[in-house]
Amino acid sequence: MGLIGRSGARAALLATAILILLPLVVPAQTPGDSDGDGFADERDNCVFAPNVTQADQDGDGIGDACDRCPGTVADVPDPRAPVRIVIDVSGCDLSQRCPCAGPFQSRRTWRRRSGYLRCVRRVSHRLRRAGRMTRAERGTFLQAAGAVSCGRIVGRAGDLDGDGIPEDGDLSGVAGDDPCRHHVTVGCDDNCPKRWNPHQGDVDGDGRGDVCDRDADGDGVPNRRDSCPLTPNPDQKDDDEDEVGDACDRCPDTDTDDAVDARGCS
C-alpha cells in the first residue's frame, strides 16, 4: 500500500474513533429539572410547568402555574387539628372534586343525590389508595357527606331546574323566546325549563327539549308508543319484531324470542 493509501486509512480510522467517542464528551443537560425553571424536580411545586417564583397562593403544595383548583382550603378532619388539606396530584381536594352545588367545574347541579355520594366515594378511595388520606379520615368524610343535603337538585333564580341553562339565557328579558337548539347550551333559553336537561337535546328542532317533548322526534307517534322515540319513523317498521324499530335498530336480525336492549341487540 502506498503512502497516500496508508494515510487515507489512518484518517478513516481516526474519523470513526471521533464519531464513537463524541457522545461521551458532549456535556449532558442539567438533570433533575424537567421544566428548566431552575428548581430541581424534587423541590419544584410544578415539575412540568416553568414557575420561577414557585407561587402557591392557597398553600396546598401545588404551584399556581399548574394548580387546577386554586383556593383550596382544609376540609378533612385531622385528630391533631380541626381539619387539614388533602389534595390529589392536580391540587384539588375532595370538596373541589365533588362540590356540593354540582359536578366538578360544571355549571350543572347534581342530577341525583346518588351522583354526589358516588363522587365522594370514588375520589376519597383514590386519595386513600394514594396514601394521602387515612382509612379513618375517609370514613369520617363519607359520614359527613351522607349527613348534608348536597346532591339534591335545588333550583336557582333564573334556573329553576338547576341544569345550568338559564330560562333567559339570551338575556333578552323574556324567558323562552329563544329556546336552545339541539345541543346548543350557550346564549339561548332552556328548552325544558322545568326538567333537568343540561345537554338541551332537541332532535326534531321544535324548540321543546326531548325530555319534555311528548313526541321527541316529531314523527307523529308519541314517545310512549314510538319504537324509535329519537329517530323519526312514522311507519314504525320492525322487521325482526323485537320492539325496536328498523330506523334505530343496531341489530336488525335478532331472533323474535331474544331479549334485546334499547339498541335492539341481544
Image (tube, rainbow, N blue to C red):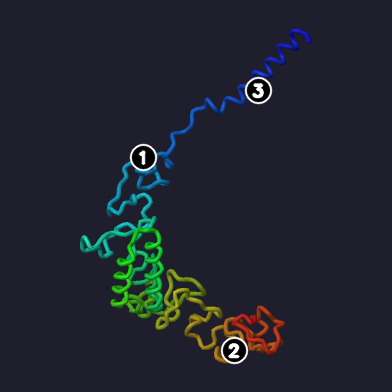
| Residue type, mark 2 in image | Asp
Q: Height in image: 175 above or below 67? A: below
Q: How would you rate the neighbour count of disc 1 (Cα within 10 Å): few for under 14, some for 14-19, many for 20 or more? A: many
Which quarter of the rendering shows the N terminus?
A: top right
- Element under disc 1: loop
Marks 2 and 3 sit apart, C-alpha to C-alpha, by 78 Å
| Secondary element type, mark 3 | helix
Nearer mark to the viewer, of 1 and 2? 1
Q: Which numbered marker is on residue 39?
A: 1
- Checking the image for residue 226, the label placed there is 2
Left or right? Give the position of 47 relative to 6. Answer: left
Please report the residue visible at 45 percent of the width from the left and 71 percent of the height from the top. 185
Going by the numbered disc 1, the residue's amino acid type is Phe
Q: Nearer the viewer, residue 215 or 141?
A: 141
Residue 173 percent across, percent down from the top left = 35, 75
Q: Amino acid at mark 3?
A: Thr
Query: Pointer 2 and pointer 3: residues touching (CB < 8 Å)?
Result: no
